[in-house]
Image: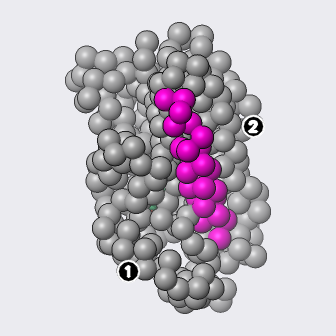
Amino acid sequence: MNTTLITGASSGIGEAFARRFAALGRNVLLVARSEDKLVSLCNELGRINSIRAQYVAMDLSKSDSPARLFEETEKRGLVIDMLINNAGFGSMGEFANLDLARELEMIDLNVKALVDLTYRFLLPMRARKHGTIINVASTAGFQPVPFMATYAATKAFVLCLSEALWEENRPHGVHVMALCPGVTDTNFFEAAQIEMPPMRSSQSPEDVVDTALRGLARGKSHIVSGWTNLLMIESERLVPRSFVARIAGRALRPHFGDGDKDTSVGKEAKDK
Ligand SMILES: NC(=O)c1ccc[n+]([C@@H]2O[C@H](COP(=O)([O-])OP(=O)(O)OC[C@H]3O[C@@H](n4cnc5c(N)ncnc54)[C@H](OP(=O)(O)O)[C@@H]3O)[C@@H](O)[C@H]2O)c1
């Protein structure tokens, strides 16, 4: 049974992907940790659309999770012809003040699990000469972002990996694309235990999914969501990267710099 696998589908952009693809008549397999949310979303999607909506509740930051998820799809007889690697989280604050375990967990989820799942599901897609992989990166992946250093670096990895895999897999009938949202109105900032940045307009998760569908239709290697975000990224190419880092640092230091309002997870962990 052809199925779209969406990680991080219990809220935000992943949930919007699930709703959209279910509405388009695609079977979905939803993955996240919050089983209650996945159960009610699957029930709703299965009832409204004539599709099969299933879930697997798991923590993808655990090293054996991607392998277990792959085996589970085989056991259920699912043909995953579309994989959306969307699960991810961020942190903000001075790198030296953040909780190291949490930073490493971020790399495990945003990078390691994404590579693992991409590899495992890519092989059968290539064998079938058909498939789509959307890796959710971020506008943060285009430049260094002080006070979001690890997060931005994980997204730079996702962007770079996806663009390379786009080229490698074109002759094999598999479309790999990085989706780069800017600030989006989801639980992302709550999950990172930080306030939403005050200075930028945000998009809805549905806007981001619209962008992804446009990117797929055009066969893009990556796509940035939102014209203002695209404009910002294009203009950054014209100046030295150190200048971009300094400007970003200047904007974020008052919110997340040492000695100022530090709402990072690491600060809380250190205070315990
Ligand atoms: N919101 C933004 O401004 C923004 C901008 C650019 C890029 N992004 C990227 O967009 C993606 C989706 O984020 P979002 O904005 O939609 O935030 P969100 O609402 O917090 O969604 C994150 C999703 O990931 C799941 N998740 C988190 N940790 C997980 C784990 N260890 N194992 C399995 N699932 C896990 C969450 O579900 P559970 O908690 O139930 O596990 C949730 O479904 C992320 O990769 C994020 O980096 C977001």
How far across and down, in percent of the image, does residue 195 sit? 46, 71
Residue at horizontal 49 percent and vertical 60 percent from the top? 138
Membership of 150 in magenta stretch: yes
Horizontal side of 163 relative to 64 (left or right) equals left
The residue that label 1 is drawn on is: 199
Where is the C terminus found, in terms of image quarters? Answer: bottom right
The quarter holding residue 10 reads top left
Residue at horizontal 31 percent and vertical 18 percent from the top? 51
Residue at horizontal 66 percent and vertical 49 percent from the top? 111
Image position of 152 with respect to 167: above or below: below
258 or 225: nearer the eye?
Answer: 225
CA separation in Å, label 1 and label 2? 37 Å
Disc nearer the start of the sequence (1/2): 2
Image position of 197 with respect to 261: above or below: above
Q: Can residue 207 be seen here? A: yes
40 or 147: nearer the eye?
Answer: 147
| Mark 2 burial class by Cα count in 10 Å: few <14, some 14-19, many 20+ | some
CB atoms at circles 1 and 2 under 8 Å apart? no
Where is the N terminus found, in terms of image quarters? Answer: top left
Amino acid type for the residue under numbered disc 2: Ser
- In terms of secondary structure, what is the magenta stretch mainly? helix
* Disc 1, SS: loop
Disc number placed over residue 177 in the picture, else none: none
Residue at horizontal 75 percent and vertical 76 percent from the top? 96
Q: Can residue 44 be seen here? A: no
How far across and down, in percent of the image, does residue 75 sit? 60, 10
- Range of the magenta residues? 149-173
The residue that label 2 is drawn on is: 63
Farthest front residue in view: 171
Count of marks overlaid on the render: 2
